[in-house]
């Protein structure tokens, strides 16, 4: 099977989109399929194209059997809605033109969000052929931003909603990442048999414990003899990480605790400035680290904090993909989440769930979890509980759906 995968993000860029696309593509290639990824020049999240690709309009690479077609895009930092939309729009134009011309013949095309524009780029790849189109819905854009009041112009809302519905009805198959996303899409009038759920997952081998790594990472960052509460991921508007600074302020007189931020995003500079202005010596900002170092960060953590902004549409419907990695690594989670995400954490037995935005509850949970640490049996139970989210198993199910779609189309 010849698979063409449209994704704005791909390693060495960090984050869940790049990890999902690369993980699936490498697995499919290893199992005998031809996989081409149409992507851009790596620049996320700071908007600076990496040195090896700077000044290029296009490049062709190999990544563990996957052919990577990189095309020019307007690199923009992930600092505002306008910058994000400009960058995403430029990728869609590039993927629809240069990316389409450069691509080899395919049996199926997958276009993955975030970005509604990538879906439209995917539709252009069907021009002049009968190749089926798979729309992969990782985030409910633009509905999320409409629900949260970040898009308020009635004309823009009507146009974006119409574009979203057109994409749903035009796709031969919709693949989404949570059961609640599927319910919402089916509620928009899409037949249930055209929507399948392939969750985000994790590679258990990548997150397996490495002897000595915990002590090594803690020593590198000065975290010895501390109870480390870490947040790893995008420092963005959807997370309200200022609440974690509030928690740090309430814990600053207890020398046991250190709050450890890892990552970058639109809110990072503001968070750093706020921590400094409050004199929070119990807060460390590591900045953006390579994905290869994240296992060590989890190992060094005593508790991993996974928040979502306290807006019902967000925390009831979204499942942060880092949850699977953290539990797969056997690390405790404190989740300021709801819905399906809360169900996964509670089922694991290695975490607690609090109401998003409730700083008192978050602080109390941190203190109590520090006083009552989990044993190795609980950690192993958590690893077992998320075994159904192993990426290779999910990739196999995804591959079966693609094969069935290609066979149906060729009849």
Image: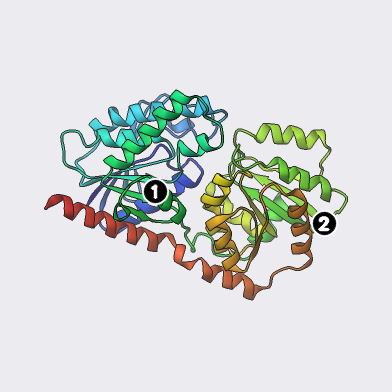
Percent coordinates x, y for residue 230 in the rendering: 68, 51
Percent coordinates x, y for residue 46 in the rendering: 55, 31
- Going by the picture, which residue comes out furthest to the bottom? 377
Q: Residue drawn 81% across and 33% down?
A: 277
Q: Residue drawn 82% across and 43% down?
A: 281
Residue 262 placement, left or right of 365: left
* Disc 1 element: helix
The image's colouring method is: rainbow
- Going by the picture, which residue comes out furthest to the right? 253
Quarter residue 9 falls in: top left
Residue 199 placement, left or right of 268: left
Quarter residue 279 falls in: top right
Percent coordinates x, y for residue 297 in the rendering: 63, 53
Residue 48 in view = no
Residue 337 placement, left or right of 133: right
Percent coordinates x, y for residue 75 in the rendering: 47, 27
Residue 383 placement, left or right of 305: left
Of badges 2 and 1, the one in the foreground is: 1
* Disc 2 element: loop
Dot 1 crowding, Cα within 10 Å, few <14, some 14–19, many 20+? few
Q: On screen, 397 above or below 135?
A: below
Residue 77 in view = yes
CA gap, disc 2 and disc 1: 48 Å
Q: On screen, 214 above or below 357?
A: below
Q: Which residue is mark 1?
A: 187
Verify CB contact (< 8 Å) between mark 2 and mark 1: no
Dot 2 crowding, Cα within 10 Å, few <14, some 14–19, many 20+? some
Q: Which residue is mark 2?
A: 256
Mark with earlier residue (2, 1) = 1
- Going by the picture, which residue comes out furthest to the left? 411
Q: Nearer the viewer, residue 32 or 99?
A: 99
**Which numbered disc covers residue 315?**
none
């Amino acid at each position: 099977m010849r698979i063409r995968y449209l994704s704005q993000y791909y390693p060495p860029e960090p984050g869940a989109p790049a990890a999902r696309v690369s993980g699936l593509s490498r697995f499919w290639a290893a199992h005998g399929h031809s996989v081409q990824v149409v992507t851009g020049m790596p620049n996320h999240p700071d908007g600076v194209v990496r040195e090896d690709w700077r000044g290029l309009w296009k490049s062709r690479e190999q990544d563990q059997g996957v052919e990577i077609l990189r095309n020019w895009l307007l690199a923009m930092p992930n600092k505002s809605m306008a910058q994000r939309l400009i960058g995403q729009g430029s990728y869609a134009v590039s993927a629809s033109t240069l990316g389409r011309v450069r691509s080899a013949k395919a049996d199926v095309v997958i276009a993955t969000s975030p970005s509604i524009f990538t879906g439209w780029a995917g539709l252009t790849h069907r021009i002049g052929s009968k190749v089926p189109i798979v729309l992969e819905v990782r985030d409910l854009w633009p509905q999320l931003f409409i629900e949260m009041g970040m898009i308020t112009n009635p004309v823009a809302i009507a146009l974006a909603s119409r574009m979203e519905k057109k994409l749903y009805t035009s796709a031969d198959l919709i693949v989404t990442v949570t059961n609640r996303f599927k319910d919402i899409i089916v509620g928009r009038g899409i037949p249930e048999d055209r929507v399948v759920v392939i969750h985000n997952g994790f590679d258990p081998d990548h997150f397996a414990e490495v002897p000595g790594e915990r002590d090594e990472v803690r020593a590198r960052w000065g975290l010895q003899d501390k109870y480390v509460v870490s947040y790893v991921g995008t420092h963005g508007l959807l997370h309200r990480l200022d609440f974690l600074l509030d928690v740090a302020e309430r814990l600053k007189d207890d020398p046991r605790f250190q709050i450890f931020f890892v990552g970058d995003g639109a809110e990072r500079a503001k968070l750093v400035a706020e921590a400094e202005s409050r004199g929070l010596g119990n807060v460390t900002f590591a900045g953006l680290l390579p994905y290869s170092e994240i296992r060590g960060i989890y190992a060094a953590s005593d508790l991993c904090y996974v928040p979502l902004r306290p807006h019902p549409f967000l925390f009831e419907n979204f499942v942060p993909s880092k949850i699977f990695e953290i539990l797969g690594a056997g690390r405790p989670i404190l989740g300021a989440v709801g819905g399906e995400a809360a169900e996964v954490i509670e089922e694991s037995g290695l975490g607690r769930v609090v109401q998003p935005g409730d700083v008192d509850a978050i602080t109390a949970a941190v203190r109590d979890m520090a006083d009552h640490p989990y044993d190795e049996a609980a950690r192993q139970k958590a690893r077992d509980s998320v075994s159904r989210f192993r990426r290779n198993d999910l990739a196999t199910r995804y591959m079966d759906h693609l094969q069935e779609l290609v066979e149906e189309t060729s009849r």
